[in-house]
């Protein structure tokens, strides 16, 4: 198969060719990661840290950013599948 076919079903890929689509995906994931870190930093640190942070503000922000990133990535995957015509149960 060449880069212009969908690897899962062997049908022509919609949208960008393989390399362009990979680059767009990389940029999107990077933007999600940077946005997740920025949002948690803007949100600030509470005066009393939760137990999950183990008394570390850095760990709290890392946990928040990780959770936000994974939720955003999951939502992005569902939106991408929806535009491809797949139901969430087929993903």
Image: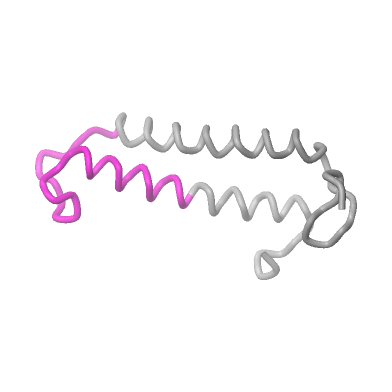
**Quarter of the figure with the C terminus:** bottom right
- 30 relative to 46 in the view: left or right: right
When asked about the image quadrant of residue 88, the answer is: bottom right
In percent of the image, x 30 and y 48: which residue is there?
63
Residue 68 location (% of width, % of height):
41, 46
Q: Is residue 18 found left or right of 47 in the rendered image? A: right
Tell me how the rendering is colored.
one colour
Which residue occupies the foreground of this view, 7 or 13? 7
Within the magenta stretch, is there residue 33? no
* 31 relative position to 78: left or right: left
Q: Find residue 23 and report its horizontal and vertical position in percent.
A: 67, 34
Residue located 30% across and 31% down the image: 41
Q: Which residues are magenta?
A: 43-71
| Quarter occupied by residue 47 | top left
Outermost residue, bottom direction?
Answer: 89
Q: Is residue 82 above or below residue 64?
A: below
Left or right: where does residue 72 sit relative to residue 12?
Answer: left
The residue located at (18%, 49%) in the rendering is 53
Residue 15 x %, y %? 82, 40
In which quadrant of the rendered view does residue 39 lie? top left
Q: Is residue 61 magenta?
A: yes
**Foreground residue, 50 or 63?**
63
């Amino acid at each position: 198969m060449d880069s212009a076919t969908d690897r899962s079903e062997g049908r022509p890929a919609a949208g960008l060719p393989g390399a362009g689509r990979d680059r767009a995906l990389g940029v999107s994931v990077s933007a999600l990661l940077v946005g997740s870190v920025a949002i948690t930093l803007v949100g600030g640190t509470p005066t009393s840290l939760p137990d999950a942070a183990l008394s570390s503000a850095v760990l709290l922000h890392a946990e928040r950013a990780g959770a936000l990133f994974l939720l955003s990535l999951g939502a992005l995957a569902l939106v991408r599948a929806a535009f491809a015509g797949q139901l969430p149960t087929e993903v």
